[in-house]
Image (cartoon, grey):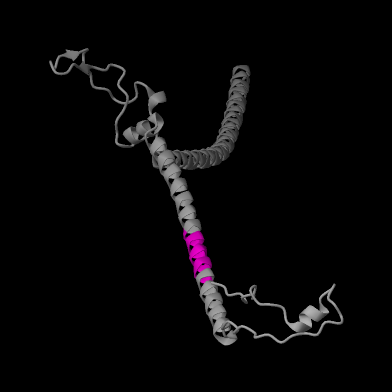
Amino acid sequence: MSALWASVTDREPSPVEEEAAPGADPGRRPTLRAVPRARPRLARMPFILVLIAVFGVGMTGLLMLNTTLQNQAFQASQLNRQATELAYTQADLESRIDLVAAPQELARKASALGLRPNPYPAFVTVPSGKVLGTPAPVSGNEVPTLVIKTPAELAAERAAAATRAKALAEQRAAEAKAKAAADKAKAAADKAKAAQKKIDDAAAAKQKAAEQKAAAKKAAEQKAAAEKAAQKAEQAAKKKNNGGRG
């Protein structure tokens, strides 16, 4: 909305204007004429108020539009961030599904449940129900390379191996200690046996010495008796010889 000052185009020039106009006759006297009634003009104060109102409404509308656009931009940013997070979550869930559905994961879960691979499988045809092959039970050790053990099973096996190694080390230490004790006892027995042998040898030597001494004494007695008998025989022979002479 706008207002302009209306220009008066059908007004005749005043005498002053005709006199000041270029090319006018300076000797001519101006004549008085009736001036037409001036058209009504708009008041300035209502126009200014209207302009202020229009400006205020425009600024208010612009501020509301700017606020709405900012809110919409913020909501769009939040929605985009939420969409990105959901896309990442979807990708993570899909990767987890792929990991869980992997053959090695299925084999690991089957091993955890106690299932073992059977190298002698049998197949059932559907819908006839005919069995192809000969089913046979397995002990679980036929194909050990295909058995995938869980971390708990591996930890239990490591703990059992450590326990066995510790028990074996303790057994070896006990055996070594017992062997050392047996060797020590054997050495003590050998030492005692040697001492007893030495005592026996000393007793035997003493007994032998006593026997030898007794034998020597007996021999000396026998010798003395023999000498005494020889003396008696000699004396008897002398007496006999002396009696024959007389």
Q: Is residue 104 magenta?
A: no
- The spot of residue 25 in percent (x, y) is 85, 77
Which residue is at the front of the view, 216 or 163?
Answer: 163
Q: Is residue 142 visible in the rendered structure shown here?
A: yes
Residue under the point 29% across and 25% down: 139
Q: Residue at x 57, y 30 (%)?
A: 215
Residue with the most extreme front position: 28
Name the residue at the left extreme. 128
The magenta segment is 63-75
Q: Residue 51: x and y, percent?
A: 56, 78
Left or right of 118? Residue 243 is: right
Point out residue 61 in the picture as x, y percentages from the top left corner: 50, 71
**Picture quadrant of residue 137:** top left
User: Residue 41: x and y, percent?
Assistant: 58, 82
**Which of 180/43 is in front?**
43
**Measured along the vertical axis of the image, is residue 129 above or below residue 86?**
above
Q: Nearer the viewer, residue 172 or 36?
A: 36
Furthest-top residue in this view: 133
Figure check: 164 above or below 57: above
Residue under the image location 81 percent in, 85 percent down: 29
Magenta residues: mostly which secondary structure?
helix
- Is 157 left or right of 139, judged from the image as shown? right
